[in-house]
Amino acid sequence: MRIFHIVPTGGDHCDFCTAPTIVKLYDCKNFEWENQPIFQGGSATMARAWAACEKCAALIDADLWDSLTERALRHFRRKHALPRSATWAIREQLRRLHLLFREHRIKPC
């Protein structure tokens, strides 16, 4: 049985759904995911940017967190041929990751 596990990674794509076009960056304090800091190096309070595509940015700006999670899940399922049996577990991982992002996000003044 294949076990799926979300591992956040940065790069030249949306950090939420992996779309190739980034339109907005969100400052966020570092936090731990699975006992590891999201951003390696630097202090725990150092702010780093999370990248979002147009659709994910619209969901974040509208505080539509459940919709963001469902969008990320759809993209994850397609990219990794996720079996339906693993959907609930991945949805919960994404939901927790998005909750941590929301809690640690630095909103502009």
Image (cartoon, helix red, strand yellow):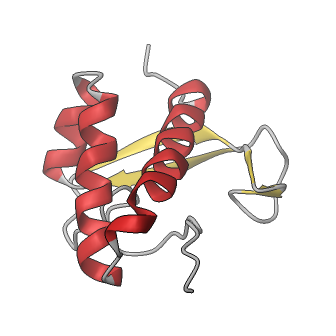
Which of the two residues, 87 or 17, is positioned nearer the viewer here? 87
99 lies left or right of 17: right
101 lies left or right of 80: right
62 lies left or right of 7: left
Which quadrant holds residue 65? top left
Where the N terminus falls, by quadrant?
A: bottom right
* Residue found 54% across the figure and 70% down from its top: 9
Residue 13, visible in the rendered structure: no
Where the C terminus falls, by quadrant?
A: top left
Residue 95, visible in the rendered structure: yes
* Residue found 76% across the figure and 56% down from its top: 34
Horizontal and vertical percent for residue 89?
51, 55
Which quadrant holds residue 44? top right
The correct choice, above or below, for 79 with respect to 62 in the image is: below
State how many labels appear. 0
The correct choice, above or below, for 25 with respect to 34 in the image is: above
Horizontal and vertical percent for residue 79?
29, 80
* Residue found 23% across the figure and 36% down from its top: 67
* Residue found 68% across the figure and 57% down from its top: 38
24 lies left or right of 25: left
